[in-house]
Image: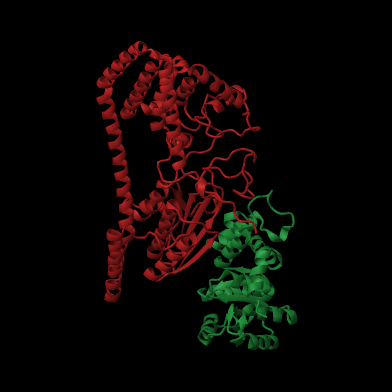
Chain colours: A green, B red
Amino acid sequence: MSAQAAGRRPRVFIVDDHGLFRSGVRSELGDQVEVVGEADDVQPAITGIARCEPDVVLLDVHLPGGGGQDVVSEITKSHPQVRFLALSASDAPEDVIAVIRAGARGYVTKTISGAELVGAIRRVAAGDAVFSPRLAGFVLDAFASAQPDQRLRPAFDTELDQLTPRERDVLRLIARGYTYKEIGRELFISAKTVESHVSSVLRKLQLSTRHQLTRWAAERRLN
Amino acid sequence: MDERPDSAGSSQETSQSAPTSQSPDTGQPGCQAPWPSGRRRSDRWLGRGWEFDWQGSARTGPQPRRAGVWPRDGGPLRRQQEDRLAGGVATGISLRTGIGVNAVRTAFVITSLISGFGAAVYVLAWLFVPADGESGNIASRAQADRRGIGLAAAAASALALVLLIAALLHVGWIGSLSWPPVIALAGLVLIWRNASPAEQAVLRRLSEPLLGDTSAGQPSRRGLRITIAAVLIIAGLVILLSEHLNRLDLRPLAGVALMFAAIVVLLGPWWLRIARDLMAERQARIRAEERAEMASRVHDSVLQTLALIQRRADDPQQVVSLARAQERELRSWLFDGRAPGSLDGLATTLAGGVRLIQQDVEAQHGIVVEAISVGDCELDADLSALLAAAREATVNAAKWSGASAVTLFAEVEPDAVSVFVRDRGRGFDPDAVPEDRKGLAESVHARMARRGGSATVRSAPGKGTEVALTMPRTAGQREPSPAT
């Protein structure tokens, strides 16, 4: 965790179309973070975030005026320092992957506890990636088909298009419900190394040109 | 066996199956085969974080230098488990003497064809030489198997009779075979009944084309057998008719028939009794298996509900709805044949089954189940058993762990399907669970073992519990992952 995150409370902006949920999150977060604003749709969110310049945006994947990824891509153009943590009750992997590919640094389900959510916000504020078990499962699934055989792998599959065995181990353990610390113990590596593996997976997820990922993202992009 | 030394002090594992060796390259456990890629990997080896071998036998065989030649060592003659075609005798001899394994195999085949001698020697070696990693040989186990000895004697006497008749009829080369094939057959019967489960699996694989798979879906093999039998009968008739056109020459045949009848009258009842005994034994085994299956079903449904009702006795609404649901389930089991906890007709794929478990357990126990599945495949009997065990483990976590959420992770890999059920609840000491607590022992461990899978429980008081279930996929289900 960086000095910035530890030093002061992260400034958080909440985007969700359910007022009840927003106030629920607000009270759960308590004074652990500073909630600087909230919005209930894509357009209000874009203007609000541009005005407040928060550290972290808690972003619902589904919004009435479009997907959360529109907010991410719009804000990232003008305010690249703002970081996004996707939050959703949705089960659809393509929605989640689309938001991540648009630039969100993590994904958690809405069932997450308050304390865990604060931890996730801190981690995103510090520039790390946050993978919930479900996101880890999605990512494993999305990359799984690229792993059949070393010889069959097409030559154009770059390093970005596949996970290393270590990254897969880490993702599996996340999907099994292990914390970073427990994963470190299990694999004999430091929690910091686990974090760097996760960040590397996130980078691959965002930059890979594998057409399955591209297709998922493209199908969901509402222009 | 604990691969996390730093947690060994607090957490313990019980295991149906002993996890065995880990890949030597500890940097990437289970990701690379520890032996050269050209070698045939035994199906029992399922790679992942650690490797399960549900037979519980450790792989101790030496590493081959290159395919076909095993480095010579000075140890006693042992049948090798790896790189075996049948009993591992040739590989063992090759390992002991330094002769190439293919040369040994060729020698066995040639001597078998010439006089049957090779086959007899091979089978006797199979019987008397212990397998690598096992202490006793099969023969010592066979001594206690009265019925097996009887069956071997019956089969041998029947074959001897056939050979005798063939010799009397001077039917070409068959007559030149004498005692070796009889010995080989008797030996094979004993091996069949007394070999370790791993070796029995090898035998089954070898004999599949001969005996045919009685399960559905093998009409072509049955057709093949019928064709072969028809060809043999026609050939026999043609030889008889062409060689013995003169009716007088058929007289010795009548003598043979009389002799044959006499032997059948003498030995027939004995053969019949042995066949009946075998059938009875088989039926008893099937009944025992059914009873175990039934017990675990009842445990999963009725006993579970009764326990729930006791815990919620203060909420009549809940009790009524639980009782109704149980009644519905029981009825559909008794009258429609849909077993409780089974996914028949509700889910046809693994991921669908996982979602179903999530929904049911969340509805029944009011706990959050985070269900994640990676990959998917069609359900078969083995995978349904895996799901039933996973469900039981999830219900167990919901009932006893005290945690508010359970993580259920299923992954389909080319050669195995794994399910992990993890909670962060109170945990328990796996060694301290009494024998009569059915949940884990019967529903999870036994259910997996009956189907050739494995179950490992990792838990410690205060540290939560993780149940790891792995079911190997049979060859028929394996299909290459679609390339994208």
**Residue in the foreground of this view, choosing between A165 and B192:** B192
The residue lying at 59 percent from left, 21 percent from top is B97
Q: Position of residue B450 (x, y in %)?
A: 40, 46
- Residue extending furthest toward the front: B246
**Image vertical order of residue A45 relative to residue A158, above or below:** below
Q: Position of residue B353 (x, y in %)?
A: 45, 61
The residue lying at 59 percent from left, 48 percent from top is B30
Q: Position of residue A23 (x, y in %)?
A: 53, 86
**Residue in the foreground of this view, choosing between B273 and B51:** B273
**Image vertical order of residue A209 relative to residue B234, above or below:** below
- Disc count in the image? 0
- The quadrant where residue B194 appears: top left
**Image vertical order of residue B35 relative to residue A27, above or below:** above
Q: Position of residue B440 (x, y in %)?
A: 38, 54
Residue B1 visible in the picture: no
**Image vertical order of residue B358 relative to residue B218, above or below:** below
Q: Is residue B415 left or right of residue B357?
A: right
The residue lying at 38 percent from left, 69 percent from top is B365
The quadrant in which the C terminus of chain B is found is: bottom right
Q: Is residue A3 left or right of residue B50?
A: right
Residue A187 visible in the picture: yes
